[in-house]
Amino acid sequence: MRRLLTAALTTALILTGTPAMAAAPSPGGAGLGDEYYPDYGNSGYDVTHYDIRVRYTPSTDLLTGTTTILAKATQDLSRINLDFLLDVSSVRVNNRPATFAKEGDHELVVTPARPVADGAALTIVVQYAGVPSTKVGAGYTAWIKTPDGALAVGEPEIAWWWYPSNDHPSDKATFDVSVSVPDGVEAISNGVQPRPPVRETLGYTRWSWRSLKPQATYLTFIAVGQYDITQDTTEGGLPVYNAYSQSLSEDFRFAAEASVERTAEIVDWESTVFGPYPFEATGGIVTPPGTLGFALENQTRPNYSAAFFRRGSNTYVVAHENAHQWFGDAISVAEWKHIWLNEGFASYAEWLWSEKNNEGTAQEIFDYLYASYPDDAAIWTTAPADPGTDELFGDAVYDRGALTLHALRLAVGDDDFFEILRTWVAEKRYRNATTEEFTALAEKISGEDLDALFSAWLYTPSKPVIASTLARKA
Ligand code: ARG
Ligand code: ZN
């Protein structure tokens, strides 16, 4: 489901003076024009659903399988790009064999036997195999081989290592993921289990997962290995699946459970602040120690590095990753430069959680952070609204993003601030968003001119002067 750049494409047709009706089928593009990652995603089609069916063997790290992509052409197409790194053995487009070739950093270029008409349904079947940990894209390997399995968990890159896709958050789709693994191994993904694991032949068991709300490609994950899975239902009726690596030592395991088992409570509290939970399931995965180096807000089911629990229970990371279900997952960035709309908001959710738990108010955290970073630190020399790829996950995006929200709260007052957050979700969920759309909404709801505030906090690469940017409401 793609909403980005349709206007740009239309403009391009007008500028070149080629009437769309008469245009000969042309190749789809090898990118979507994201300012930071121009060759991520592809143009010319819009994916509706991915059916990913793979088999994975931990001892060899061999992944084999078939992904079926249900899509719609958005132009007359002579060629279709996908983003993918594994070795492809066959591609079919609309039930005819297609030719294909690897190109560039991560492109799979497919030439259908006959052109596909604008607006036509498109079924692409890709059969493949490969050892994901041997593949390099964007200069590294995002796939993580663990002692007992693997993790396909990463941002912004991860899909290329395990399924072919239109890899950009502006083309969200629904997902069926099924993973066949040796009997006794667990395989977990997003959403709900439409059926229990099924024993197949040859000592393999197939695990099926389904996520039927629009989902970005990078938020689609698999975790394979020895996991203990807990299953429950929230008061509101949401299925909860949590999973703990069996390789966690006892103290890590207690701390992890004391945090992740509170997911339902935290999600219910966040629903009272942000509006109804946007998805059909919840839960969390705690990965083997020394493997994943971060946490990621995979849709319906965040993944946590074990390291988050090294100092005991930690509900802040649970509040952060689950806040992303609203900010980042339900509302996706239109382009990667808008990443503070994800990280600033999830970080501010931690401040609110702190306030609720009497561990420091949002105002105290604001004052503390404002005073504690040196004047020449990256948080001040980076503009959150345009951090660049090097600072995509830097302090300006996380802490200054949250500082910005608190500055907004002080300027417009609590009633307007929380109405802005809830309206933002209500208007943008299941879609894509930009910083400019958020600042416009804040001005609309508050009825105030917030140009000076947002200019200082979001767009200027220097430390905002509080007095001149915050009109504190009496
Ligand atoms: N979105 C994740 C979080 O803040 C961070 C992912 C960072 N990615 C990375 N490759 N380090 O929860
Ligand atoms: Zn985050």
Image: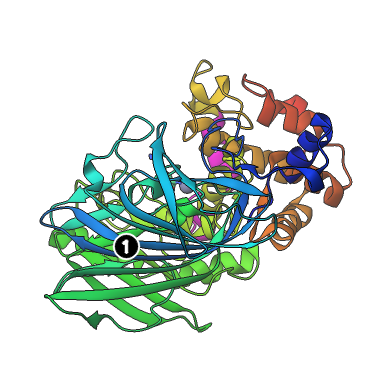
Residue lying furthest right = 447
Answer with left or right where residue 75 lies relative to residue 91: right
Q: Is residue 102 above or below residue 186?
A: above
Q: Is residue 104 above or below residue 123?
A: above
The crowding category of the residue bearing disc 1, from other C-alpha atoms within 10 Å (few below 14, some 14 to 19, many at least 20), is many
Q: Is residue 224 visible?
A: yes
The majority secondary structure of the magenta stretch comes to helix
Displayed quadrant of residue 148: bottom left
Quarter of the image with the N terminus in it: bottom right
Q: Foreground residue, 383 or 366?
A: 383
Q: Is residue 288 visible?
A: no
Q: Amino acid at mark 1?
A: Ile
* Residue designated by label 1: 285
Answer with left or right where residue 63 lies relative to residue 139: left
Query: Horizontal and vertical percent for residue 256?
Result: 28, 61
Q: Does the residue tagged 1 have its C-beta within 8 Å of any atom of ligand 1?
A: no
Query: Horizontal and vertical percent for residue 165?
Result: 47, 52
Residues in magenta, as a range: 353-370
Q: Foreground residue, 420 or 69?
A: 69
Report the colour scheme: rainbow
Query: Horizontal and vertical percent for residue 21?
Result: 81, 48
Q: Foreground residue, 90 or 355?
A: 90
Quarter of the image with the C terminus in it: top right
Query: Horizontal and vertical percent for residue 302?
Result: 40, 59
Q: Residue at x 77, y 25 (%)?
A: 468
Secondary structure found at label 1: strand
Answer with left or right where residue 101 lies relative to residue 399: left
